[in-house]
Image (tube, rainbow, N blue to C red):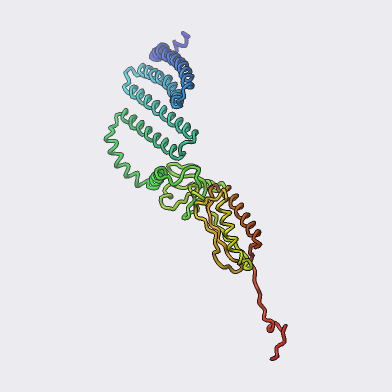
Amino acid sequence: MNQIKSLIPTSWESLYQQLDTNVVLLTAASLIIWLIWRVIYGRLEALVERTTIHWDNLTLQALKTPVSALIWSWPATISIGFLLQQQMGSSLDWLSTVKLILVIAIFVWFIMRLINNAEEYVLAQKKRDETTVQAVAKVARLFFLTIGALTIMQAFGLSLSGLLTFGGVGGLIVGLAAKDLLSNFFGGMMIYFDRPFKVGDWVRSPDRQIEGTVERIGWRMTIIRTFDKRPLYVPNSVFSNIVVENPSRMLNRRIYETVGLRYDDGSKVEKITQDIKAMLENHPDIDANQTLIVNLNGFGASSLNVMVYTFTKTINWIRYQEVKQDVLLKIMAIVADNGADIAFPTQTLKIDPISAGEVYSPNQ
C-alpha cells in the first residue's frame, strides 16, 4: 500500500486522503440512512395496508424510489464537491445550485410517479370515464413538468419575467413554424373538453373513410382500430373539420324492413299488419315507447309492400342482429298463420288468343 502511495503525486495523495476520510464517511452514512429508510418504509407499508384509504398506498409507492435516489445522490454530490474543491483549491459556488436542481428533479419525479399511480388506480376502478382520467393526468403531468423546468431555469439565474417575455415572442415564431403541430394539440384539447367520443367508442365519419373503435386519444393524433383490425392514425386537427358520428351513444337501434305480400293476399293484409304490430308491442326486446309503424306502404311490381318500423332496446350490434332475426322469423310465422305468403318477383304474361292463332277469325 505504501508503495502505491509513493507513486501518487503530492496533490493526488492529498486527494486520496480526502477520499479516505470524507467520501468514505459520506458513503457509509448514505448506506446507514438507506437501511433506516428501508426499515421505515416497511413499517409504513404495513401500516397503510390496514387502512381503507388507497391514496396513502399510492403516495408511499411513489415515494419509495425517489427517496432512495435522494439518499444516495445527495451525499454523492457532496463527495464530488469535496474532490473538485481539493483538486482546484477553491470553493465551488455552483455546487449549491446542483443540489437545488437535484431536489427539484427528485420532487418532480415523485409527483410524476404519484400521478401515474393515481391514473392507474382510477382506471382500474372503472368508475370514471377513461378519456377524462387520461386527459386530467396528462394536463397534471404537463403542468408540473413546466413548473419544474421554470424553477430549474430560475436556479440557474435566469429571469422568469424576461424568459416569459422572450417566450411570448418565441411562441409567435414557433406557432407560425409549427402550425400543424399546434392545431393537432388544440384539436386534442377540444376532444377532451367537448368529448364527442371516448376510448372504446365506435366512431365513423361520412366525410372521410374513418370508421372503427377508438383505442387511444393522444395530444397529436387519435388511434382508431378499424373493423378489419387495421390501426388508423388520425391527426386531431382533422376532427375539427369533419362530421363525426358516434353510434356507441345511440339510445336504440332501428329495424326498418319492407315485407312484400302477394297480391292474392290483399284481403288479409289488414289482419297481418295488426298481428305484426301486436307482436312487436309485446316483444321483450322491442322498445314500444319509441316510434312503431306497421302499415301497407305501397304497391310494388309484384307485391303489396308492408313497412315494419320499430326500435330495439339494445344498442349492442351482435344482440341487435339476434333480435332482428327473431322479429323477422315471427313475421314470417304470422304471414303463414294467416294463410298468406311472402311474395317473390313474378310476371304475368297476357296472350291474345286470336293473335296467337288459337281461335279462328272470319277475316282469315
Q: Nearer the viewer, residue 17 or 46?
A: 46
In this rendering, position of residue 136 left or right of residue 344: left
Residue 93 position by quadrant: top left
Image point 52% across, 50% down: which residue?
A: 287
Q: Which residue lies furthest to the top in this view?
A: 2
Residue 118 position by quadrant: top left
Q: Which of 5 and 210 is in front in this view?
A: 210
Residue 17 position by quadrant: top left
Q: Position of residue 86 (x, y in %)?
A: 36, 16
Q: Where is residue 243 in the image (x, y as percent from the top left)?
A: 44, 53
Q: Nearer the viewer, residue 71 or 6?
A: 71
Q: Is residue 181 visible?
A: no
Image point 44% across, 21% down: which residue?
A: 68
Q: Is residue 363 above or below residue 160?
A: below
Count of labels in the image? 0
Q: Where is residue 205 in the image (x, y as percent from the top left)?
A: 47, 52
Q: Is residue 7 visible?
A: yes
Q: In this view, does 302 lie above or below 130?
A: below
Q: Which of 178 and 345 is in front in this view?
A: 345
Q: Position of residue 150 (x, y in %)?
A: 33, 32
The quadrant of the rendering that contains the C terminus is bottom right
